[in-house]
Image: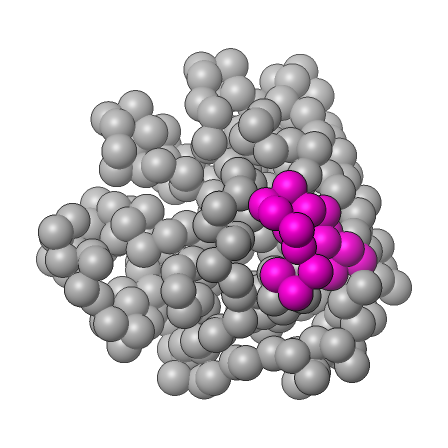
Amino acid sequence: MFGGLIGTLRDRQPLVYSITNYVTVNDCANAILAIGGAPIMSDEISEAGEIAGNASAVVINIGTLNERTVEAMLAAGVSANKKGIPVILDPVGVGATKYRTAVTKILLDKVKFAVIRGNVSEISAIYGGKSTNKGVDAASVDIMDINDIAEMAKKLSKDTGAVIAVSGKVDVIADKDTAYAVYNGSYYMSRITGSGCMLSCVLGAFCGAVDSYLEASVCAVAAMGIAGEMAEKKMEGTGSFRMHMIDGLSNMCENVFNEGHRIEKL
């Protein structure tokens, strides 16, 4: 079901416009290229709307925030929405500071997102501020089981209209009706800077090529996890792990995916 989406992506070569964390921008661009997309990276306000309007997907990552880039994010998101282009949000550190939380709220109010991807704490912070239901206490995040996470993701998807992708030991991807768990991945993905940022850009590539954002998101998360597993087998250290993970994305195909994925419908 999911493996065939990789061929679709490589055939369509989606243009992915990313306003992302400047710590990881090079890795993000290479990840998009490796999976079969075409990256463009810019946070200049005067061209953000124009680029977004010509892209296949837009990725907004708030990892290294400043007032100038926030304006570019809004311009890109609004422009993409007008043309029906999917926008992916990576709300890095939301809930950690008042500024990040306020910026995320503004983005959610003004931009319709196709996918929101974050870790459990980040998604919980958005859920607590966005849902009409009671939010998840920060202290309870660490004890949430997979079914709790799936339920939270479904409710947040209903509130926002976005597919919710929750990264963790087990990744959970859900829309308002359906949730999947992905068991692929490597411990070392948490030991390098940028694996999450790269995943958000890979999500952008899949969403720019595939009509179902839920299926695109499940495939993207599993493909990234499989690439991490492939990298772990070849690594000499965390530096070579990063390199081999990008190699894994570049070598991803339907057969590799189908043999390696561990996806469960919840």
| Rendered residue at 69%/84% (across/down) | 259
Question: Would residue 169 be found to the left or right of residue 71 on screen?
Answer: left
Task: State the residue in front, 171 or 117.
Answer: 171
For the N terminus, the quadrant is bottom right
Task: State the residue in front, 232 or 175.
Answer: 232
Find residue 126 and report its horizontal and vertical position in percent. Answer: 29, 47
Task: Classify 64 as above or below 201.
Answer: above
| Rendered residue at 65%/18% (across/down) | 44
Magenta: main secondary structure equals helix
Residue 244 drawn in magenta: yes
Residue 10 drawn in magenta: no
For the C terminus, the quadrant is bottom left
Residue 194 lies in quadrant: top right
Find residue 96 and report its horizontal and vertical position in percent. Answer: 26, 33
Stretch of the chain drawn in magenta: 232-250
| Rendered residue at 45%/23% (across/down) | 65
Question: Would residue 157 be found to the left or right of residue 206 on screen?
Answer: left
Task: Classify 27 as above or below 135.
Answer: above
Residue 134 lies in quadrant: bottom left
